[in-house]
Amino acid sequence: MTSDDDSEDDSPKRRPFTDLAVRLIFGSRGDALVTFRKEMFDRSERRVGEMWIAAVDDSGTDAESLLASIQTDERLSDLFASVVETAARTRWHAKLQALGKVLAMGVTADDDTTVDATEALDRAIRGLEPVHVRVLALIRQIGRFNPQGTGLASWIAKAFPNADLVAAETAAYLQSRGLVLDPFYVNGVLELTPLGERVMSLIDAATSPAIP
């Protein structure tokens, strides 16, 4: 009978056997695939490492104490798992640092309301991309305004050159995560929500360029 741990193909113990199987199946191309697979793992580890460094720096404590706090609280463990998963797939440095700050905020929270806020921030940042930040930055720059009765997607398509293909998706993401109000439904006013403002402050605080 095989345990759950033994069934993890990506564990260090099983990786040599998986690499061998790749070489046997793909022949001469196997070495290239094995190298590519290793590069993917290494890249993910570097990204998670950058997020973790940001979390430790922002928490005001050491890595061991931060990890101990995460391990003793189920909600923080879930937050940690979510942040790590997102970080592993993120190549945007500002987002990695923002994720680290969110994790540190959750660990240092002294009440459930603050933990609730960090979970909302985690959900908002999880799928955040530079195109979303560009839209948020322009809305914040303009301030509270009425875009002449159009919806958010229509306004994005007009405000950004060649944005037709991404306008609807961008608007849907920003609205579904509660980052911006849709002027079509909310008194004709376009503005960031408090959550949107907080997300932007986290991105602004990143030491690398906010928008690549």
Image (tube, rainbow, N blue to C red):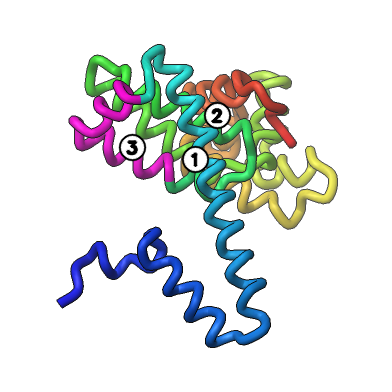
Q: Quadrant of the C terminus?
A: top right
Circle 1: element type: helix
Nearer to us in this view, 75 or 193? 75
Tell me if residue 105 is in the magenta stretch: no
Name the residue at 29% across, 70% down.
Answer: 7
- Residue 25 x/y as whole percent: 54, 87
Q: Is residue 144 above or below residue 35?
A: above
Residue at image position (60%, 19%) is 205
For marks 3 and 1 on the same chain, the one whose residue lies earlier in the sequence: 1
Instruction: Looking at the image, tell me whether mark 1 or mark 2 is earlier in sequence order.
Output: 1
- The image position of residue 48, as x and y in percent, is 49, 40
Dot label at residue 29: none
Q: Identify the amino acid type marked 2.
A: Gln
Marked residue nearer the N-terminal end (3 or 2):
3
Asked if residue 79 is positioned above or below residue 21 in the image, the reply reads above
Q: Which residues are magenta?
A: 64-84
Residue type at tag 3: Leu
Residue identifier under label 3: 79
Residue under numbered circle 1: 48
Q: Which residue is mark 2?
A: 97
Q: Principal SS element in the magenta part?
A: helix
